[in-house]
Image (spheres, helix red, strand yellow):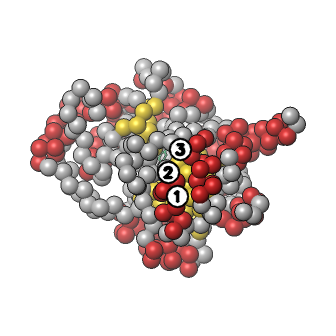
Amino acid sequence: MPARGELLARLGLRSPIIQAPMAGGGDSAALVAAVNEAGGFGFVGAAYLTPAQLTERARDIRSRTALPFGVNLFAPQPEPTASAALTEAAVARVAGFYAELGLPAPSAPAYPGDSFATLVPAMLDSGAAIFSVTFGLPPADVVSAAKTRGMRVMGTATTVAEALALEQAGVDAVIAQGAEAGGHRGGFIGDPAANLIGAMALVPQIVDAVGVPVIASGGIMDGRGIAAALALGATAVQLGTVFLTCDEAGIPEVHKQAILDAAILDAAEDQTRLTRAFSGRPARGLVNRFMETVEDRERPDAVLPFPLQNALTRPLRAAAGQQGRAEFLSLWAGQGAPMARRRPAGEVVAALLSGCAATVEKLAGV
Ligand SMILES: Cc1cc2nc3c(=O)[nH]c(=O)nc-3n(C[C@H](O)[C@H](O)[C@H](O)COP(=O)(O)O)c2cc1C
C-alpha cells in the first residue's frame, strides 16, 4: 500500500479530516465551507433534499469556498411493506406526541419513494469531488458516471463482508463505521442493528481485508482519536458528532444544547442508544422520552420500516425543533458526545490537526 500522503492525494484530500455527511441539516453550506477553509473536507448528506435543494446547497457551498466538497446519498432501498395492523399501532403510538405539540392527529404515512435515483443527476452536476453512499452499494452505472466526471466514490461498511462488497462495486475508499458512530447505521448485509463492531476492532480488520484506502468513523472527537485511527491503518477519518455543536451546524439549537448538556434530558448515565423509533432504521442518538416511549421494550414493536417511520415522525420532529422540545427530536450523537464543545468549525479542525500532530509526536518520543 502506498504511503498515507499519496493515498490522501489520490482521494483529493488535503488532510485526514473529513466532516461527515449529516442528512437532516447538520451539514449546512456554512459548515462545509468553514471545514474546507480550515483544512478539512466537508460533505453534504443529501438524502433528504430534493434535487433542486441539492443543486442550491452545492451552489451555496461553491459561493463560499473554492475547495472541493463531497455529496452523500442513501443507496437505493427496496420499497418497504407494513401491515395495516402495524401501521395502525405505529400511528397510535405517536398520536399523543402530536397532540402534545399542538399538531393535527397523524395518519398512515405515504411511501415517499426512493430518493437515490431522483437525486443522482443533481449529485453528478453538483461539482462535488467525492460521492459517497451509506445503507448499501452504489449501482455500477452511477459509479461509472461519477468516475467519468472525475469524482472519487466511497461507501460505508460496518463489517468486513460489507467492505469487500463495496470494493467489488468499485469504490475508491471504504468508510469503516464503528458502533460508536452517531446517526444511522450504514450496514446493509444482515441486521444493521446486530453488526455493532467498535471502530478499534473494525478498522484494522477492514484495512487487512481490502486493497483500497480505509476511512475510520465513529467516536473520534479529538486528535488522539485521529492518531489512533491512523495507527490502525486508516488513511483518513470521518467525524460527525464533533461538528454538530459547531456554530455553523444547521441542527436546532436545542439539539446542540442536548449534546453539550445531556443532563437536561436526565440521560447522563446512558447517554446514547441505538433506536429505530424516529426513522425505522437503527441510529444512535441521545436517549429521550420519544425514543423510550415508542420503543417500549415491555410492549410489542410498533415501528414502521424505513422510510415510513421517518415520514410518520417528520412533522413531529419539525414542530419539536421549532418549539425547542428536545424530548421529541432525533438527537443523533455518537458515543463521544460528552467530549463535544461549542466552537466555530475552523477552531475544531485546527484543534484536530494540532492534536493529532501532538499525539504522534508524543508517541514517537516514547
Ligand atoms: C446527525 C448525523 C447525521 C448523519 N447523517 C449521515 C448521512 O446522511 N450519511 C452518512 O453516510 N452518514 C451519516 N451519519 C454518520 C456519519 O457519517 C458518521 O458515521 C458518524 O457521524 C461518525 O461517528 P461520530 O458521530 O461519533 O463522529 C450521520 C451522523 C450524524 C451524527
Query: Label 1's element?
Result: helix
Classify 294 as above or below 63: above
To which quarter of the image does residue 332 belong?
A: top left
- Packing grade of label 3 (10 A; few <14, some 14-19, many >=20) is many
51 vs 4, nearest the viewer: 4
Q: Which mark is residue 163?
A: 1
Give me the residue at 56% from left, 75% from top: 147
Image coords of residue 182 (percent x, y): 49, 41
Q: Which residue is mark 3?
A: 178
Q: Which mark is residue 159?
A: 2
- Marks 3 & 2, CB-CB < 8 Å contact: no
- Packing grade of label 1 (10 A; few <14, some 14-19, many >=20) is many
Query: The disc labelled 1 sits on which kind of residue?
Result: Ala
Who comes first in sequence, dot 1 or dot 3? 1
User: For the image shown, how many numbered marks are present on the structure?
Assistant: 3
Q: Judge from the rendering whether residue 68 lies leftward or rightward of residue 15; answer left or right.
A: left
Query: Label 2's element?
Result: loop
- Marks 1 & 2, CB-CB < 8 Å contact: yes
Give me the residue at 37% from left, 64% from top: 76
Q: Judge from the rendering whether residue 131 lies leftward or rightward of residue 264; answer left or right.
A: right
Q: CA distance from mark 1 to mark 2?
A: 6 Å
Q: Residue furthest right?
A: 365
Give me the residue at 75% from left, 64% from top: 2
Q: Which mark is residue 283?
A: none
**Res 147 visible:** yes
Image coords of residue 140 (percent x, y): 45, 74
**Res 40 visible:** no
Query: The disc labelled 3 sits on which kind of residue?
Result: Gly
Give me the residue at 54% from left, 40% from top: 198
Query: The disc labelled 2 sits on which kind of residue?
Result: Thr
Classify 338 as above or below 134: above
Q: CA distance from mark 3 to mark 2?
A: 9 Å
